[in-house]
Image: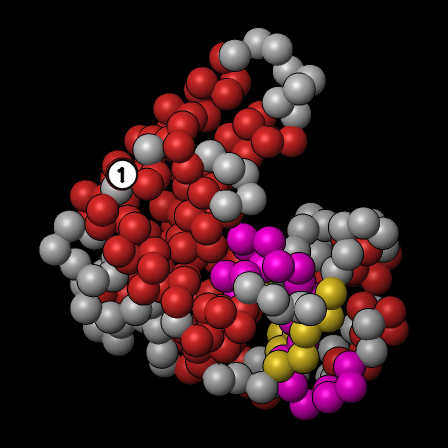
Amino acid sequence: MASLADFPITRRWPAAHPDRLQLYSLATPNGIKVSAALEELGLPYEAHKISFDTNDQMTPEFLSLNPNNKIPAILDPDGPGGKPLALFESGAILLYLAEKTGKLIPADPAGRYHCIQWLMWQMGGLGPMFGQLGHFHYFVADKVKDPYPRERYTAEAKRLLAVLEQRLDGRPYILGDDYSIADIAVWPWIRTLGGFYGAGEITGLDKLANVQRWFADCSGRPASQRAISIPS
């Protein structure tokens, strides 16, 4: 496709600035990840709210961009070779933005793979497990009487938090001295675990000194503070 106008999603969510990267998202942990990266990188972009209340994610226009009907997704008018690029999956988007700008990811090959390693750790472990804990602890706590699901995901959340606590021992950030997409992938989920899900106490989150110090740093960054309200 030669221009953004060729993508069906722009008919439902028109681009006021077609020269800018288009973000289709909501301020969930996965959505905040991409907003935080865009804010850190200073890339011009336009945010479109995909409302779950009205099932925007199930519309033909959104599904044309992301057949997996999840946020976030992006359209970059200036993709590889100067052609528009459509992309979904928050981890893939973070990696794309970092490599597009040469920022938030180490330049050396070994450092780059270490960054990808922790990004995959969040995508395959921490995010899904925290999400399952939130489901059973917060959303359906009054419907599911069997304690097993809540206990199972609480235990796994604790294990993952212990991995993060150990990793951050003696390190300002997950990779070391530099803030990266690895940090951006994780801190919105820590925010949701202890905040919206109300699962900080049962997972021992408040007792993890390294995680608490790191989270305060990451979430307190100006770009992070803006990201938690994007799209408005």
Residue 74 pos. (x, y %): 64, 69
The answer to whether 69 appears left or right of 99 in the picture is right
Residue 59 pos. (x, y %): 85, 54
Q: Residue at x 40, y 28 (%)?
A: 202
Viewer-nearest residue: 125 or 171:
171
Whether residue 110 is visible, yes or no, is no
Q: Quadrant of residue 114?
A: bottom left
Q: Is mark 1 on a helix, strand or loop?
A: helix
Q: Quadrant of residue 183?
A: bottom left
From this viewpoint, which residue is outermost toward the left?
A: 170
Quadrant location of the C terminus?
bottom right
The 10 Å Cα crowd at callout 1, few under 14, some 14 to 19, many 20 or more, is: few
The residue segment tinted magenta is 15-34
Whether residue 213 is visible, yes or no, is yes
- Residue 133 lies, with reference to residue 146, above or below; the image says below
The answer to whether 163 appears left or right of 223 in the picture is left
**Residue beneath label 1, please?**
207
Quadrant location of the N terminus?
bottom right
The answer to whether 198 appears left or right of 212 in the picture is right
Residue 181 pos. (x, y %): 38, 64
From this viewpoint, which residue is outermost toward the top?
A: 146
Is 19 colored magenta in this rendering? Answer: yes
Residue 75 pos. (x, y %): 66, 73
- Residue 67 lies, with reference to residue 96, above or below; the image says above
Q: Residue at x 34, y 56 (%)?
A: 215
- Say what amino acid the circle numbered 1 marks: Lys
Q: Residue at x 32, y 41 (%)?
A: 206
